[in-house]
Amino acid sequence: MAILPTEHKEIEIFIGHVLDAATSVFHEDLRGVYVHGSLALGGYDPESSDLDVLIIASRPAKLSDASAINRALTGYVNFEISFLPEHAARQFVPNSRFVSIRADGTVGFDVYGPDWVIQLYVVREYGIVVWGEAPNHIIRPITPEMLRKAAIGTLKSWWYPKLANRSSLMDGRYRIFAVLTMCRIIYTVRTGEVVS
């Protein structure tokens, strides 16, 4: 298992449970478990950040797989676990449907949109390997132009609809997240890079 920053011992314990559950569910099909998002990029705040985990397996995850892992993590909060089959990590196609354990604790199929090009870039370049191959051996290189296109696609598919229905923007914490995300998108469009 990877060594996580020492100030986050509770995360190390949580990740150990994730790895145990993923190994129990996927057995020899498990290819890798990676921490990404704000912890990998250095912007993790235990008061406001969630923990992002990606599990890659040689086969697509089923709802029952994610549900079993979710049950093993009962009592933990503020995490999201995404599942990708190895072929999709190698050649990602935006707007594909894969299984997720969502931040609200539910399990379901989600559309992995253009933002997942950015997520995979973070995993490939900054991800913390909990178990498995280095992510740059699984995830193909992602160019600055691909990042720019993904950032614009995310703006169009995720954020434009929020202008028509602003109810989620009425929540103060979500509004902070929205402003921060817009700043990240502007930075990526201008530089072709990702920042936390």
Image: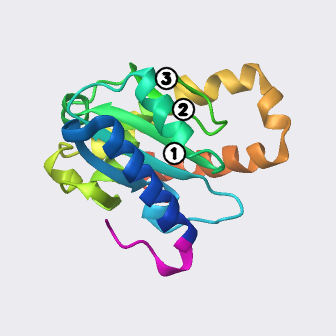
- Name which residue lies at 47% across and 33% down: 68
Name the quadrant containing residue 97.
top left
Front in this rendered view, residue 126 or 196: 126
Question: Quick check: can you spot residue 105?
Answer: yes
Quadrant hosting residue 174: top right
Looking at the rendered structure, the secondary structure element under dot 3 is strand
Say left or right for 177 vs 10.
Answer: right
- Image mark for residue 155: 2
**Residue tagged 3:** 110
Q: Amino acid at mark 2?
A: Leu
Q: Is residue 32 magenta?
A: no
Please report whichever mark, 3 or 1, sits nearer to the chain's N-terminal start: 3
Q: Residue at x 41, y 29 (%)?
A: 65
Left or right, 192 with respect to 162, comes to: left
- Of 91 and 78, nearer the camera is 78
Quick one: label 3, few (<14), some, or many (20+) residues within 10 Å?
Answer: some
Q: Secondary structure at mark 1?
A: helix
Task: Pick the residue in front: 192 or 70.
Answer: 70
**Highlighted magenta segment, given as a residue range:** 1-9
- Look at the numbered disc 2 and give the secondary structure of its residue: helix
Asked if 13 appears above or below 32 in the picture, the reply is below
Report the residue at 69% width, 58% height from top. 48
**Residue reaching furthest left?**
137
